[in-house]
Image: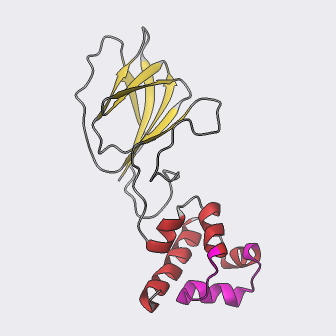
Amino acid sequence: MEEENLKDLGERLQGLREACDVSRHTMAEELGVDIDTYRGWEETGEDIPISAIYHMARKFNVDLTEILTGTAPKLDTYHLVRRGETEEVERFPGYHYEDMASRYARKIMQPLLVILDPCDEPAELVCHDGQEFNYVLEGSLILTFGDRDIQLNAGDSIYFNPTYPHGQRCNGDVPCKFITIIAE
């Protein structure tokens, strides 16, 4: 790696650690190095073992590629989690799980409560930048994603790439309530 890229890597590690409110001493202890060695990694980006970078990526729930390059992989399609299941039901290449509240300078909308009635006409499909998260509180929701309909029931959640045409409609005879958050 070039010297400037290494310095950027150190700055990304420092920014990530600080954003997650973890001290240098704590990180040094977790990684089994003295504080001066760890401080040097952050200040210069030099001689950082890939195992240390991988540990930080896992700890702070950030994609390894994002730390190494400064560029987040793009969510290709969607990631669906069914109520009561901890494993991903659908996972597609190019997606990395990411906490919607993580730092990295993403603009995050306030959570929005949406209530759809069974009699509501389906909205036109829309596209926008960022990543979108929907979590169903009550009822049943149909998310149209491109040419595919995905049914979500209470307790189900989905992250998806909203640059694909998408829209939501109520499924069933009772109103559907869901939370939506968009991170750009």
Q: Residue at x 45, y 33 (%)?
A: 179
Q: Residue furthest front?
A: 93
In the picture shown, does residue 106 fall above or below 156?
below
What percent of the width, then of the height, locates residue 140? 46, 19
- Residue 165 is situated, as x and y percent measured from the top left of the image, at 27, 37
| Of the pair 31 and 26, the residue shown nearer to us | 31
User: Is residue 102 something one can see in this rendering?
Assistant: yes
**Where, by quadrant of the figure, is residue 44 drawn?**
bottom right
Residue 178 lies in quadrant: top left
For the point 57% across and 89% down, the residue is: 46
From the viewer's perspective, is 35 left or right of 108?
right
Most extreme residue toward the top is: 173
User: Range of the magenta residues?
Assistant: 30-50
Q: Is residue 36 magenta?
A: yes
Q: Is residue 145 above or below residue 153?
A: below
**Horizontal placement of 15 versus 167: left or right?**
right
